Amino acid sequence: MDVVELVRVTSPRGDLAGGEPNAAELRTRTRVHAAAAELGPVSAARIAELLGLTGAAVRRHLDAMVAEGVLEAREPAPGRRRGRGRPAREFVVSSAGHDAMTSGYDELAVAALTHLAAVQGPDAVTGFAEQRFAALGERLAASVDPVAPVPERVRALAAALAAQGHSASARPVGRGTPAEGTQLCQGHCPVRRVAEAFPELCEAERRAFERVLGTRVQRLATLAHGDHVCTTYVPHEPGDGPVPRPHEPQNRLAAPAAGNRTPTEG
């Protein structure tokens, strides 16, 4: 069984159902919230296993956050259901939950970029995005060994991104197929609202990842396009082979050509 390391804890808002939480409950809830942000869609049982908590305790915190709108519960995708009986619900951070994690400067940033595009043209926004993510890429590259195997590079990048507030994790996909690789998943994006208006930010980030990792990557889903997580596929072998679908089938971005798809693991 693969173990995904939780690399960042982000504090959720609100109180526990049934009364004011104490300090220990708040710490537990913060860990549960971070697991949902980094690994979602994820079941209560999986969170309990990773955090060393009881299933009942995890479900209590999850239910409270769902009631407040911080998390959403959904049925797992058909390819992820295992065993008999009703499948366990899986949890992801809701749109409101992401809003609660943002800095509050989104409106100002959108206004500034809108003015920049109006005065100097769309290319000015692209240039700004490239400059911003080039600087981020330089900081991230310091944590990534360029000669390490690709999976290690992706895990190192995920850890570095988590330190920047992206709630990132890495998971293997397509094992034993031509599409074998690693998916970089970002459960929170500090600039999500801005990227909704200016997708140039997402594309500049993707190119920065290619420079940091030293290999091609493909963005499969983004929070800015309405997906619950930003998903970036990194092949283990160079070339233009098939690309697996993201672990969330509700992908609104351009999909790979039919016939070049393989199911995603994990």
Image (cartoon, helix red, strand yellow):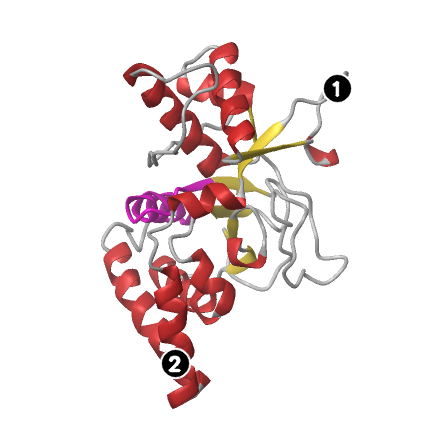
Regarding residue 145, the answer to whether it shows in the image is yes
Looking at the picture, how far across and down is residue 189, in whole percent? 42, 52
Looking at the picture, how far across and down is residue 32, in whole percent? 43, 25
Q: Which residues are magenta?
A: 150-170
Asked which quadrant contains residue 94, the reply is top right
The residue labelled by disc 1 is 86
- Amino acid carrying label 1: it is Arg
Asked which quadrant contains residue 226, the reply is bottom right
Q: Quick one: label 1, few (<14), some, or many (20+) residues within 10 Å?
A: few
Q: CA distance from mark 2 to mark 1?
A: 52 Å
Q: Residue at x 49, y 60 (%)?
A: 217
Identify the element where label 2 is drawn.
helix
Looking at the picture, how far across and down is residue 124, in whole percent? 38, 83
Q: Main secondary structure of the magenta part?
A: helix
Regarding residue 187, the answer to whether it shows in the image is no
* Quadrant the C terminus occupies: top right
Give the left or right position of residue 189, taking residue 237 as reference.
left
Q: Residue at x 48, y 19 (%)?
A: 17
The residue labelled by disc 2 is 115
Does 154 appear in magenta? yes
Identify the element where label 1 is drawn.
loop
